[in-house]
Amino acid sequence: MKRAFFSGVFFVVLASFPLSGDVEFSGLDLSEELLLFKADSSGKGSLPQSGVFAAALDSQGRGELRQLTAFPERVDLLDSGRMLQVRNAFGVMRIPVSGGLPRSVSGFPSFSEGAPVLGGRVESMVSSEDGRWILSVEPLSPAYGNLVLLNTANGGRTLIAERVERPSSYFPASWSPDSRMFVYQKENRLYYFPINTLASPVDERYRVIGEGSVQSINWGRLGEFYYLKSSTIYRVRSFDLFARALYTDFLEAGTIAGTIPFEFDPNFDRFWMAPDAGAVVLSKGGRNLFYYPLDSARELLPQSSLPYVLLPGAASDIRLLWSASGLITTLVSLPKKGGREVLAYRLDTGHQGMVFSPLDRPPGNAMALSPDGTRVLFWGPGGAVLYDYINWRALAVLDDNAVYAALWMSGDEVIIAGSNLIERQRLDGRRSLICLSQAGAFGYEERSSRIAARAGDAWYLTDCLSPWTQAAAPVLREKRISSSRYRVYLENQSAGAYVNIPMARNTASVGTFPLIASHTVPRDRPSGTAEEREIAGVFSHGRREGLRETALVFDCVDDDAGLRTVLEVLEGFGLRATFFLNGEFIRRHPESARSIAEAGHETASMFYAPVDISDARYRIDREFISRGLARNEDEFFRAAQAELSLIWHAPYYAASQETAEFAAAAGYMTTGRDVDPLDWIERNDAKRTGLSQLSASDMIDRVMAQKRPGSIIPIRLGLLPGGRDDYLFNRVDVLLDALVREGYDVVPLSVLMEHSR
């Protein structure tokens, strides 16, 4: 096989493998100058997955690379349904819907291009509907980056905005359906950018929409968008924006489409517009779901009888479908031991006396409505099922393996992206292969240069140029690790992100070359650069040397805001954390306390009452401490039918040697912290103490600058009585991603203690 089939040069073949946990290489199989291998990523922030690659070697161990499989962790349908975009731990690639091998996107970081693809979560970006443009945030720090526009046709890059927040649960920009413009957020303000001004862009000062985030807008079908500011919904069209550019200080962003009965907070609330823009569904704090008609339609329905549903306390990941006929369905997920429980609610806006009614549980936690609104696809770990949307009943099982994405191509054809294959399926049962997702086995065919791979129970062949085609079970030759010019082998690694590294020895000349550059972990602050306050009997940090791990702990004081987000993020990263609960939180939110235990996290004590035990007005003795700890144990058992671990920290981290001795007598280990994000500072605290209220992103950068191996990093859950503009818990995924990228293992506090002995 000639090396000429590759396009571009892959410099130091695997030098930029994503650092998303332990990565292991296997299956080396050499055919003269072409090396096959498999890379397995265990997943930290992304799903566990593998990829099969072919690398053409040269005399320096450098060469070109082609990705042969594409794990469909994130999938988009672009270019009027002609192109599939797949994102996973190995980067971003595109595949023709007609079938083909994955191709990297010119100018965008991917494994096969050799550009840095850092680990943690799947790389966040948004593509225009026509596939021509990609918006991404290029990192400046753990929490900030530059918003950059990439032209996928020529790899050209344009800086759109400096120092925007790196993506959290949503990307900080959104494309119009016609690909003519996008809206982005920066420092709690929204801006627009028309593509036709790219050659000579208008100054950012004249592209302001108003306060808010990308969560404050919904796109309409004609290229307009609906912008919710405070309690007013504006309909915004392109000519409204151009007029506002001239009169920024005098005009609102558009025309008023309606009002809602409360203030909209984009940090916690969401909204969905009806297809005809005559009504809105509002999620208030992720707990309350309202249907609210706008303008004249509201007069037909008394406000006292507006449809409303109170979601369970641990509900998260709200998804909503709204058909043109007015049929609304919403799904929410609940954490349960061993998985998640999905609940569904239905509202028919075409009938009087409307109410949100519970539906039979759906077969998946993700859904997509057909173009005509009569059928719906459900998918998830159990497969993909086609439903009659109107009557809520199953019509057909489309796949019984794990499915990661399902997309409608037309009214009678879908794309099913599963653990083995990405396929087009007609609803009459006919299928055609797009690409392999993963391969259980692979190698060279005995009597040809073709590559064979097994996905599921079937075998497929490719010549590294053409799409995979199904074949009868081929005869594979034995795997080889040497040819007339090369010998390849795996070299084990004792540290870093890689279990091993593929090496190539040029036997026809001289030189042995690694096909992966060893991962260099960023250096932490050296010991002794800052004085640490050590208190006898108080565990304030773990080992500084030998292990690269940290504990993320969450303080549940009196309010459960942010808990659902945190539990969902921890589940996505596959991590266990420690939650400190006090009696006030347990009494107010017993269901939330129970959900922490049911999700498998470590639960610890923050005392029975939120008293500052360093206050001289209190008489703190052994009985006071032991009773407060015991009563908190009893409160938690009544709420969760589980026990607290014998770990505590005093309210406000007011630890002392004396209180630690009292707690030890009751069987408890006292803990402290060595990193303070300052997320506890209320507006009044800022005025009284002179300490600034940092933004969530600034707090992340603060934590990443202060943390060291063994650090205990506390995050306060709940809304502060004195108020904040934003909260660190809303961006905990960004913090975890930054820790993972720097090679840290995030462990429960008890594990940090155990490893410190």
Image (spheres, rainbow, N blue to C red):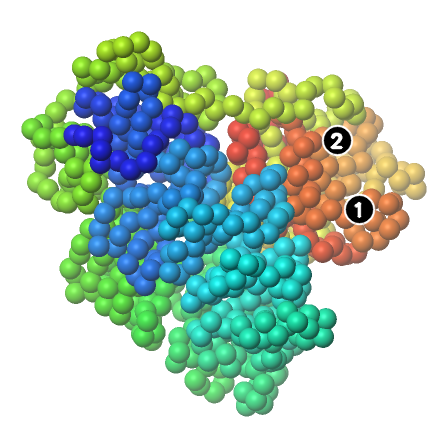
Can I make out residue 563 in this image? no
Instruction: Give above or below for 81 relative to 372.
Output: above
Q: Closer to the N terminus: mark 2 or mark 1?
A: 2
Instruction: Give above or below for 697 relative to 250.
Output: above
Cα distance, mark 2 to mark 1? 34 Å
Q: Is residue 646 left or right of residue 567?
A: right
Q: Residues within 10 Å of mark 1 (few under 14, many from 20)?
A: few
For disc 2, the marked residue is 663
- In this rendered view, identify the residue nearer to me: 200 or 531: 200
Q: Secondary structure at mark 1?
A: loop
Q: Is residue 321 left or right of residue 148?
A: left
**Residue most extreme to the front:** 200
Q: Is residue 588 left or right of residue 3?
A: right
**Image point (17%, 34%), residue name:** 451
**Image point (61%, 83%), residue name:** 303
The location of residue 141, given as percent across then percent down, is: 61, 39
The location of residue 245, given as percent across then percent down, is: 64, 69
Q: For the residues carrying marks 2 and 1, which lies nearer the camera in this image? A: 1
Query: Looking at the rendering, in which quadrant would you find the C terminus?
Result: top right
- In this rendered view, identify the residue nearer to me: 417 or 362: 417
Kind of residue at badge 1: Ser
Which quadrant of the structure image shows residue 265?
Answer: bottom right
- In this rendered view, identify the residue nearer to me: 721 or 205: 205
Q: Secondary structure at mark 2?
A: helix
Can I make out residue 446 in this image? yes
For disc 1, the marked residue is 692
The location of residue 238, given as percent across then percent down, is: 53, 72
Instruction: Give above or below for 401 relative to 525.
Output: below
Which quadrant of the structure image shows residue 414?
Answer: bottom left
